[in-house]
Amino acid sequence: MSELLFAAAAGMPIAAGWSLHALRLTRRIESARRDPLTGLWTRDAFTERAERRLRVRPVAVYLVDLNRFKEINDTHGHAAGDAVIRATGERLAAWAVDHDAVVGRLGGDEFAALAPVDSHAHLTDTLNRLSETLEAPVETASRVLDVSASIGAVGVDPGSEQVALSELLRLADEQMYRAKRWEAPWSNALSLTPECTTIHGRRAGRPGTATAKEVA
């Protein structure tokens, strides 16, 4: 009996070492799926988690794009631009906790989110609150910058409507672009029918399409 206990005790450091190695490996993998500037999920990691959530209950998909971000970079420098992106990421991360949401940075100054929604009124209230959150000034090392965002959203009930996440993001993108054109803080889709034509799977007018004339 004592020999068995000794053998088990001798194996404990090895098992503990493997457990620690597995934990470190898991953390490294998760870190690689986080955007280094904001700590939010990267596009692929966001997509993976959002697609799982999309099958569970009614949700809304949001697309957030900062206004005049290029102007901030050109006028105040990339350090100021990074500060704005970082602050936006922190605000979205806090919003995600309060709203049981999944949030990711798609690239540049563009972010996406998916969160449960119970009604059109709930969605409208959420959009108003999210817009207020994102429009707070950002303090940098040398100045305070005014920040605003255009938000597009679309709600869907997976129990009655089966729509792919990529299509919902495109619909939210249409509404985001509409909000920019109207200089409104947000716009939400009233149906799941696209309003804009598509070129190579992207909304006409989007960067990368032949008709691109995007509003910054």
Image (tube, grey):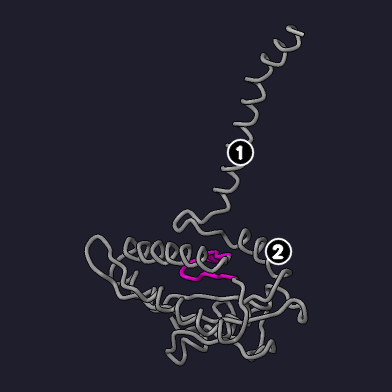
Question: Farthest residue toward the front?
Answer: 1
Q: Quadrant of the C terminus?
A: bottom left
Q: Magenta part of the protein: which range?
A: 102-114
Q: Secondary structure at mark 1?
A: helix
Would residue 125 be seen by someone viewing this image from the given angle?
A: yes
For the point 59% across and 83% down, the residue is 210
Q: Residue 59: give x, y in percent of width and height.
A: 64, 75
Q: Secondary structure at mark 2?
A: helix
Would residue 211 be seen by someone viewing this image from the given angle?
A: no
Mark 1 or mark 2: whose residue is earlier in sequence: 1
Total labels drawn: 2
Q: Residue 170: give x, y in percent of width and height.
A: 63, 79
Residue 44 vs residue 88: left or right? right
Q: Residue 11: give x, y in percent of width and height.
A: 69, 17
Look at mark 2 in the image and give the residue it sits on: 52
| 194 in relation to 29, above or below | below
Dot 1 alpha-carbon crowd within 10 angstroms: few under 14, some 14 to 19, many 20 or more: few
The main secondary structure of the magenta stretch is strand
Quarter holding residue 8: top right
Is-magenta flag for residue 166? no
Q: Amino acid at mark 2?
A: Arg
Please tell me whether mark 1 or mark 2 is closer to you in this view: 2
Residue 141 vs residue 194: left or right? left
Q: Amino acid at mark 1?
A: Leu
Quarter holding residue 19: top right
For the point 57% across and 67% down, the residue is 101
Look at mark 1 in the image and give the residue it sits on: 25
Q: Nearer the viewer, residue 25 or 117?
A: 117
